[in-house]
């Protein structure tokens, strides 16, 4: 079994990356082989609407035909058994890097034929980890749930079960005194980091183990 994690955040050792590592540890505990990719290491763009993935009699149906540094990752995703995605929330949505990756992945799998939603022939379980600065009780008024549900619907193109995990009120800086951020209470943020983030890490571990276990059945 192969589990791939894709980090859509710019930092490799902070909230999103940490939770993805924990999810991969969970997958490894279920016997999976794992790999982690950082989107900010790659030079690529979003879908260019060339429709090459939908040309009749093409061997590339279901595959993005645009060639750049994202191409090998997209091909690995199509071969994996479970996919873990992670992104911080920037201005109410995933990062631009993650959004461009999702465009390339989802559009190539989306079928334009009547009565068929996806051209993907296999079942891949998926999980999406979202990290965000806002507290959990702010989510309803900000409308973030619509973003999470929309991505969950798109992940149905992989034909497998999909879940998502929310890590809210995250700790953003090593030292808040170095930044213009007076609206945030550093003591509160540190308390959340100490008390709640370990719970988020355990949930991420369980997510990775659970998705790997589902595909092992």
Image (tube, rainbow, N blue to C red):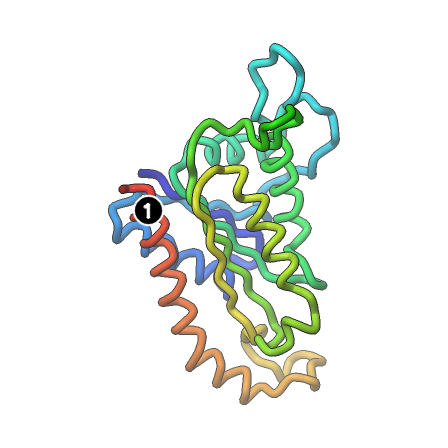
User: In the picture shown, does residue 33 fall above or below 92?
Assistant: above
Is 152 above or below relative to 72? below
Task: Indicate the position of residue 171 as horizontal and vertical percent values.
Answer: 54, 75
Foreground of the two, 166 or 12? 166
Q: Which residue occupies the extreme front position in the image?
A: 115
Q: Residue furthest top?
A: 57
Picture layout, residue 124 above or below residue 59: below
Out of 119 and 207, give the one closest to the viewer: 119
Quadrant in which the C terminus appears: top left
Q: Relative to residue 18, is residue 213 drawn left or right?
A: left
**Residue 161, horizontal then vertical, whole percent:** 43, 46
Seen at 64% across and 34% down, the residue is: 107
Q: How many marks?
A: 1
Q: Residue at x 59, y 44 (%)?
A: 154
Q: Which residue is mark 1?
A: 214
Pick whichever, 129 or 210, lies toward us: 210
Q: Residues within 10 Å of mark 1 (few under 14, many from 20)?
A: some
Residue at position x 70%, y 86% from top? 182
Quadrant the N terminus occupies: top left
Say whether residue 125 is left or right of residue 92: left
The quarter of the displayed image where residue 195 is located: bottom left
Position in image of residue 2 (x %, y %) = 35, 39
Front-most of residues 91 and 43: 91
Q: Is residue 67 visible?
A: no
Residue 210 sits in quarter:
bottom left
* Helix, strand or loop at mark 1: helix
Name the residue rendered at 40%, 67% in the picture. Answer: 201
Residue 64 seen anywhere in this rendered image of the structure: yes
How far from the left and from the top, in percent, is residue 106?
60, 37
């Amino acid at each position: 079994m192969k589990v791939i994690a894709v980090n859509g955040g710019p930092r490799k050792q902070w909230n999103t990356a940490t939770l993805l590592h924990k999810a991969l540890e969970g997958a490894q505990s279920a016997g999976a082989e794992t790999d982690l990719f950082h989107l900010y290491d790659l030079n690529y763009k979003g879908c260019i609407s060339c429709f090459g993935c939908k040309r009749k009699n093409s061997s590339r149906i279901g595959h993005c035909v645009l060639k750049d540094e994202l191409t090998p990752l997209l091909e690995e995703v199509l071969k994996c058994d479970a996919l873990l995605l992670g992104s911080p929330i920037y201005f109410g949505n995933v990062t631009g890097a993650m959004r461009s990756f999702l465009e390339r992945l989802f559009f190539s799998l989306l079928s334009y034929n009547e009565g068929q939603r996806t051209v993907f022939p296999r079942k891949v379980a998926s999980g999406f980890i979202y990290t965000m600065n806002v507290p959990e009780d702010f989510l309803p008024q900000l409308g973030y749930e619509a973003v999470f549900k929309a991505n969950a619907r798109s992940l149905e193109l992989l034909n497998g079960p999909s879940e998502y995990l929310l890590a809210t009120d995250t700790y953003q800086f090593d030292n808040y005194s170095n930044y213009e951020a007076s609206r945030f209470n550093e003591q509160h943020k540190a308390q959340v980091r100490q008390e709640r983030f370990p719970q988020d890490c355990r949930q991420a571990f369980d997510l990775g183990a659970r998705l790997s276990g589902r595909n092992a059945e």
